[in-house]
Amino acid sequence: MPIDISRKLVFIVVALGVLLMWIGALGLNSFGITDPGALRAFLALAYTGAAVAVFGCVLGALGAPRATDFQRLGLLILAGFFLMAASIWT
């Protein structure tokens, strides 16, 4: 039984990934944490958010049956930007 992937589902998954990335970046840059364990935890949170956002973009681009070609292209470009943003934290 196939699942109908709607725009709302794609938006929720990408928004969840962006929220996780924002929390991770906020923890890395704003709190002045020097503990290596906490830094790794915030970095893992940011990477997890980027992975969720990329998954949501690719899910919408390749799995949504009613998406137009330009929407698919835009989602794939957005996935590339999320990968680029994740590479900044290394």
Image: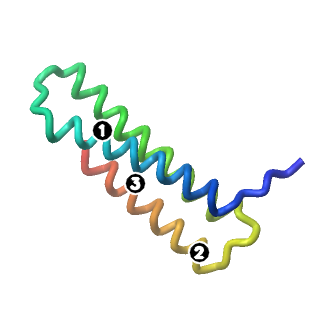
Q: Where residue 83 is drawn, which disc sits there? A: 3
User: Tag 1: residue type?
Assistant: Gly
Q: Disc 3 vs disc 2: which is toward the camera?
A: 2
Rendering colour mode: rainbow
Picture coordinates of residue 66, whole percent (x, y): 74, 71
Asked whether the beta carbons under mark 1 and mark 3 sit within 8 Å of each other, the answer is: no
Q: Compute the Cα span from label 3 to label 2.
A: 18 Å
What residue is at 52 percent from the left and 66 percent from the top?
76
**Most foreground residue, 33 or 89:** 33
Element on which disc 1 rests: helix
Counting residues from the N terminus, which is met first, the one under dot 2 or under dot 1?
1
Asked whether the beta carbons under mark 3 and mark 2 sit within 8 Å of each other, the answer is: no
User: Tag 3: residue type?
Assistant: Leu
Q: Where residue 24 is drawn, which disc sits there? A: 1
User: Tag 2: residue type?
Assistant: Gln
Q: Compute the Cα span from label 2 to label 1.
A: 28 Å
Which quarter of the picture shows residue 69? bottom right
Q: Compute the Cα span from label 1 to label 3.
A: 15 Å
Picture coordinates of residue 48, whole percent (x, y): 43, 38
What residue is at 80 percent from the left and 51 percent from the top?
3
Dot 2: within a 10 Å radius of its alpha carbon, few (fewer than 14), some, or many (20 or more) residues? some
Task: Say left or right for 7 vs 25.
Answer: right
Which quarter of the picture shows residue 40? top left
Task: Say left or right for 68 vs 73.
Answer: right
Q: Where residue 71 is drawn, which disc sits there? A: 2
